[in-house]
Image: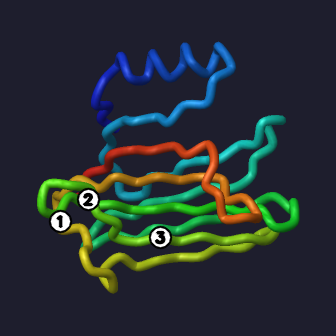
Amino acid sequence: MRFRSRLTKLAACAATAAGLTVAVATSASAADFTVPIYGTSGYYLGSGTFTSGGSGTIQVYDAYCDGDNGIIAAAYVVRNGSWTTSGLVGTRGCGTTNTNNLSDNDPRPGAGEEVKFSVCKLLPDGTWKDCQTYYIHND
């Protein structure tokens, strides 16, 4: 895994220790890159996974039986100089999984292209909360 900046990680750790909510911005390269999501009480809520190769695939898993909450993930690519949504995927419900094959989307990531990948808690009203963001190379 490649990190864009050690200072970014250090700052995120310091802010977390201080009790603040942060978005992590790192750069990584992996065939499967999974982001676990935890609740404020430390319970494992679920995860989001980016699978590289071709145009890539994003998947979310809701592990926690808490009613209408869920997990949502988004993949973005740079088009015309700005980050553009390539795909979204979300799920709600104990033990559910949902997948979005990005090759079906426009725009879609190309081989070797950097992908911005965000995984968040999904609240009942549709709000995204406590997102974690990573920059992944679609190798």
The residue positioned 33% from the left and 46% from the top of the image is: 135
The residue under the point 83% across, 35% down is: 41
Q: Residues within 10 Å of mark 2 (few under 14, many from 20)?
A: many
Give above or below for 22 relative to 76. Answer: above
- Residue 53 position, x and y percent, is 28, 68
> Given the current orientation, which residue lies at the most extreme bottom position?
104
Q: Nearer the viewer, residue 24 or 27?
A: 24
For disc 2, the marked residue is 138
> Are the two marked residues, 3 and 1, in contact with CB atoms closer than 8 angstroms?
no
Q: Nearer the viewer, mark 3 or mark 1?
A: 3
- 48 shown above or below 1: below
SS state under label 1: loop
Q: Pointer 3: what residue?
A: 88
Amino acid on which the number 3 mark rests in the picture: Leu
- Rendered image quadrant of residue 79: bottom left
Q: Is residue 50 above or below residue 106?
A: above
Dot placed on the residue nearer the N-terminal end, 2 or 1: 1
Residue 26, given in percent of the width and then of the height, sits at 36, 35
Front residue (pair 72, 27)? 72
Distance, label 2 to label 1, CA atoms, is 6 Å
> Quarter of the image holding residue 40?
top right
Quadrant of the drawing holding the C terminus: bottom left
Label 2 element class: loop
Quadrant of image for the N terminus: top left
> What is the C-alpha distance between the residues marked 2 and 3?
17 Å
| Residue holding disc 1 | 111
Q: Are marks 2 and 1 in contact (CB under 8 Å)?
A: yes
Kind of residue at disc 1: Ala
Q: Position of residue 25 (x, y in %)?
A: 39, 36
